[in-house]
Amino acid sequence: QVRLVESGGELVQPGGSLTLACTGAGIIFSRRTMAWYRQAPGKEREWVASITGDSSTSYSGSVKGRCTISRPNRNNIMTLQMDNLKPEDTAVYYCVDTASSTWGQGTQVTVSS
């Protein structure tokens, strides 16, 4: 059974940086396409970024140039580095295994002064 756990969300000031992490059990990340999604209050869930098994990455237009998705040289961790954060980045961020459609419980990111 695949299980995903996100961490790293916190309150940060506009312009600041944050790194989210996703760890997993029952899954080898390097063999899967993994993704980050987010959901802001009152809005639909939104795709943020993806990384494939061969480490190809893609980003939504709203974060491209400010975020980096990566999979450190370990099998069960994925990160999302976010820079120049804006108030509109405030959301719960979710780690997703696209093959099994498994979602983590989410981690709250709040960008506010």
Image (cartoon, rainbow, N blue to C red):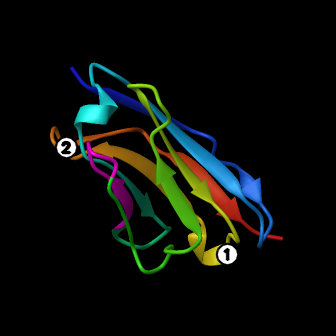
Determine contact: label 2, label 1, CB under 8 Å: no
Decide which of 76, 106 is in the foreground and name it. Answer: 76
Q: Secondary structure at mark 2?
A: loop
| Position of residue 53 measured from the top left corner of the image (x, y, whole percent) | 26, 42
Q: Please tell me whether residue 106 is drawn above or below residue 41 in the rendered image.
A: above
Q: Secondary structure at mark 1?
A: loop
In the picture, the quarter occupied by the C terminus is bottom right
Taking the magenta stretch, the answer to whether it contains residue 40 is no
| Position of residue 22 measured from the top left corner of the image (x, y, whole percent) | 47, 37
Taking the magenta stretch, the answer to whether it contains residue 53 is yes
Which of the labelled discs sits on residue 13, or is there none?
none
In the picture, the quarter occupied by the N terminus is top left
**Mark 1 highlights which residue?**
86
Quarter of the figure with residue 36: bottom left
Decide which of 2, 55 is in the foreground and name it. Answer: 55
- Magenta span main SS: strand
Q: Please give left or right for residue 2 compared with residue 65 in the image.
A: left
Mark 1 or mark 2, which is nearer the start of the sequence?
1
Highlighted range, magenta: 46-55
**What is the crowding at mark 1: few (fewer than 14 residues within 10 Å), some, or many (at least 20)?**
some
**What is the crowding at mark 2: few (fewer than 14 residues within 10 Å), some, or many (at least 20)?**
few
User: Going 74% across and 55% down the picture, which residue do you hit?
Assistant: 11
- Residue farthest to the left, as pictured: 99
| Position of residue 77 measured from the top left corner of the image (x, y, whole percent) | 46, 31
User: Going 39% across and 73% down the picture, which residue do you hit?
Assistant: 60
Question: Marks 2/1: CA distance?
Answer: 28 Å
User: Going 72% across and 59% down the picture, which residue do you hit?
Assistant: 17
Q: Please tell me whether residue 105 is drawn above or below residue 38 in the rendered image.
A: above
Identified by mark 2, the residue type is Ser
User: Going 42% across and 49% down the picture, which residue do you hit?
Assistant: 94
**Mark 2 highlights which residue?**
101
Identified by mark 1, the residue type is Lys
